[in-house]
Amino acid sequence: MALELKNTSLKELAKLYDYISMCTHCGNCKYGYEWGKTANFAAMLCVQGDKYHFDSYRGSRGKSAIAKGLLSNKLQWSDAVSHVLFTCTGCGACQQMCETDIKPYILRMFEALRYEAWKQNVAIPEGIKKWSSTIGVNHNPYLEKHENRLDWLPSSIRSSLPKKAEYIYFAGCTASYRQKNVALATVKLLQKLKVDFTVSEDEWCCASPLLRTGQYDLAKEFVEHNKSLPDKYGASGFITTCAGCYRTLSRDYKMDPPEGYTDKFGKMEGVKVIHTIQLIEEMLNKGEIEFTGSFNNTVTYHDPCHLGRHAEVYEAPRNVLKAIPGVNLVEMYRNRKFSYCCGAGGGVRGGFADYSLETSAKRVREAESTGASVLTSTCPFCWRNLTDAIEMTKSPLKMVDIVEILEPIVKRK
Amino acid sequence: MARGNKEILAKLEQIVGQEYVSNEEANLIPYSWDLTWAEPRMPDYVVMPKTVTEIQRILRLANHQKIPVIPYVNATNIGGLCVPEEGGIIMDLKRMDQIIKIDPETCYAVIEPGVSHAQLSAALKATNPQWEGVEFSKGFEFGWGVHPASASVLAMAINHGIGHLNGRLGINSQLLSSMEVVLPTAEVVKIGSCAYSDSWHSFLPLPRMDGLFTGWMGTTGIVTKLGLWIFPIRPYRDVLTIAAASAKDITKYMVHWRHYSLCDEVTAVSWWLAQIPITFPYKDKPKDAPEFFSYTVISGWTEEELEYKRKMWKKVVQEEKARGTQLIDFEYPEEAKRGRTELPSRIVGSTKNYSKSCGGGLAWPGTFAPCKSWPILYEKWKEIYIRHGLSPATRFTDYQGAHYGMLRCMTPFDKRKPESVKAARDAMVECVRAGIPLGMLPYKPPVEYMNELNAAADAGYVYLMTKIKDMLDPNNIMNPGKLGVR
C-alpha cells in the first residue's frame, strides 16, 4: 500500500508531504507516558481525543492520516474533516510524545491543514469566521474597536510612560480587551521594578489566532506591522504577559520552519522577546527584587501550552512562585511537558465554546484535587477559560495570574 | 462523505449513543491502514462501546445484518490485523479502559481491552507485593514489549506479543489466567477460575478453552476482560552485552547462556538492527563490524544475586571463546541500557528506532522459530532482503529456555513509493515461505502469511481451525478474511 502524493493543489500541505509521510501510525502520540527510576506517569493528554474519542481526533496520528488521505486522494474534504481539524487546540501534547521525524512538523501540519480547509467548501466554525471577518479592521479577534485598545491603561500611567524605552510591553488582545486586570497588574509591576518599558499606541494582534487557525494570508499584515514597532520606540525587545503572544513573537516572528513562519513573513531580527515571568526570574536571580509582603496560599500552577510545550518555559514560573513568601506550591498530576490544555487554544474557545469550557472544567477539577486554594498561570487566555470553568463549576478555587500575585508585594531593591 | 447505511447507523447510535458512532470517512480513514503494507480498506462504521452489553447488542445486529466486526484498540500489531478486509464495523474498544482489579497477594490483575501499557504499568508500579498487609517489595510488572505506551495490553497479550520477561517467564500469552469473552453470536462466557468465583488467578486445571481466543486475531470473539499474572519488580537490574562475528556464533552463545535460566531476556540483533534508525535502503555493513550484538537483562533481589549472575555470564562467555566461538566484547550505550532496565519505555516502544526517516512504513516477518533454525534462516533471509534492497535487521530472542524463540526482521520501507512497498511485501512473504519448512511460524500474521501457512499446514489442522471458526462464528462476521480460510 502506498500513499503517493497525488493532490498537489493543496500547496501548503503538499510542502509538508515528506514529513507527514514520516508518521508511522504508531500511536505514541495518543497518550502521555513516562516511566523510569524517578518517574511514573501515565495520562491522557489530548483534550480533543478526550472529548471526541475516535482515532481521527486522538493525537497527531489521526490528523496525519487525514493529511495523507487528502494528499493521496483517498479522502475528500467534508464538514467532518473540518470538524476534526478545528476542534484541535494545538496544545502540542502529541508533538511532545512523538518520536519520529514528523515530530517538529506536527503543529505546522495542523495549521497547514486548516489553511487548506479555508479554501474548500467546508464548514468553518462560525465563531472563527466571525472574528476573522473583522480582524483586518479591528486588529483584534474580539470584535472590539482598535481605538479602544488602550482603554485598560489609566491615563495617569499612560502619561508617565516614555516615548522611547528598552522594552515594549506587548499586552496582547486578551489582556487589552478582556483580562484588563492582567495588563494593569503587569504595567504596575514593571513600574515598581523600574523596568525601562513603554506601551505601544498602535499594537495590533500578534496574529496568533490567525496563524493557529491557518489564516496565513491575513496574518502577514499583522506580523509586518508589529515587527515595525521596536524601531518606532527605539526598543530592543518585547515583554509579554500572554503565552500566546510570547509563542508568536518569539517563534513565529523569529524562527525558521517548522517552529516559526519566517518562510512567509521574513525574520524579526535583533529584537528580544521575553515573557514577564522570565524577566522576573532574571531579576530575582540578580537580587533586584525585594518582597514587601507575602501571599499565604497553597497555589497550583497551570502550564499554558504556548509557554510550556511550545516554548519550553517550565521552570521560570515555578521558580518565581517558590520565591514568593507564603506560597505553598503544589503540582497537578499533569504538569510541565505533560500538562493538560485549558481548552481555549487553536481557535477552539471561539469556535466551540461548550467543548472549550468542558475541557477547562476538567483542568479545574484537577487543580482542585491538589488541595490548592489558588490556581495560577501566566496567560490571560488560560485565565479567562479557567475562570469561566471555576464559575461554572462553582469551584472554590481563585484564579490569579502570577503578575497579580507579585504586583502588590514587591519593590525594586 | 459518509459510508454505510443510515438504518444501521441509527441502530448503532441507539446502542452506544450518537457521539460514539461514526460513518464519516474523516473518522474512518485512520482505521483503514496501519504501519504495514496492508492495502488500505475503509470500514463503514466505527463504534465505541463502553459495556459488555453494548458489545452483545452490536454483535446481534452484525449477525442479523451479516456485517463484519473488527475488534480494535490501537492497531499497533504490525500485521494489518485491524485493517477491515471486507469493510464493516470497527469496534474501537478504547473506552473500555478499566483496570478492574490488582490483587497484590495472589499476584494478578484484571483489565479491560482499552487499558494501555502506560496505564497498567503506572498502576502496577504503584502497587506493592504483600501478604495480609505486610509489603515485601515495591511495585509489580508485566511483560512490557516493544510498542507505544498507548498500545493495548490485552490485545498484545492475546495475540502472543512478547515482553521483556520472556526469557524468564515466556511470552505474554503464557502469563494469562482467566478471561471473559463475548462470542461472535453475542453470548458472554467466562474461562478459567473466574468461571467459578471472582478469583481470576488461573486457567488450570480446567480445559484450556482460552486457546479458542488466543492467537486467533479477533476472529473468534471479543475478549472483554483478561486476568494476567503480574510479577514483583526486582530492584537490581543490569544489562550485559557481547557481540559476535556471525549468526551461528551468537546463537551458540545464546543457547549456552539461557541454559542456566538466569536472565530475564537474552536478545541478539544484527548489525542493521543495531543502527538507529535501521539503514534504509540497504547498505553494506562495515567489514570490521560484528554481524550480531546481544544484550541480556539480569535481575535480582540483592546485589549479590546480580553479581552471581554476572559471574555465570562471564563463565559462559569465556567457555564459548575458549571453544572458538567468535565473540567480541562491546559496551552498550547508556541510553540503550536505560531503555532496557527502565521498561516500558516510550523511547524503546516508539518506532523511531526502526523507521525514523524513511517514509513511514514498518513491517516484519515476526516469527517463532526453533533456535536451531536461527542461523540457517538468517542467512536465507539476508540473501532475500539484500536482493530486495532491504537491510536484514534481524532479531533473535529466547523464550523461556531451550524450546523456541523469536526470529524477526524489522523492515522499514517507503510508503510514498509503490515499488518500495512491493519490495518489502515480496521480501517478507518470501522469508516466511523459506522459514515454514524449518519450523518457523509467523505470529500476528498478515493475510499473506496466513495463506503461506495454510498452504503448508497439515490438512487436519486447517480442518479443525475452520471447524472451530464456523462453530463459533457461523455468519463469519468476526474480522473475516484474516485466517485465510473464511
Image (cartoon, coloured by chain):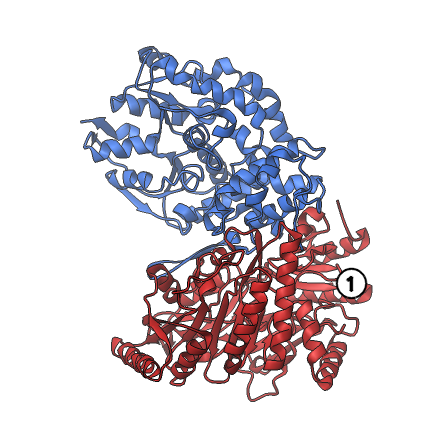
**Which residue shows up at 47% across the image and 25% down it?**
A266
**Which residue shows up at 37% across the image and 49% down it?**
A371
Mark 1 crowd level (few <14, some 14–19, many ≥20, 10 Å Cα): many
Q: Is residue B386 visible?
A: yes
Q: Position of residue B202 (x, y in %)?
A: 53, 82
Task: Say which quarter of the image contains residue A219.
Answer: top right
Say which amino acid is labelled 1.
Ile
Q: Secondary structure at mark 1?
A: loop
**Which residue is label 1 attached to?**
B67
**Which residue shows up at 37% across the image and 76% down it?**
B326
Question: In which quadrant is the N terminus of chain A drawn?
Answer: bottom right
Chain A rendering hue: blue
Q: Position of residue B68 (x, y in %)?
A: 75, 64
Q: Position of residue A238 (x, y in %)?
A: 36, 24
**Which residue shows up at 48% across the image and 35% down it?**
A257
Q: Is residue A393 visible?
A: no
Question: In which quadrant is the C terminus of chain A drawn?
Answer: top left
- Depth check, front residue: B30 or B266: B266
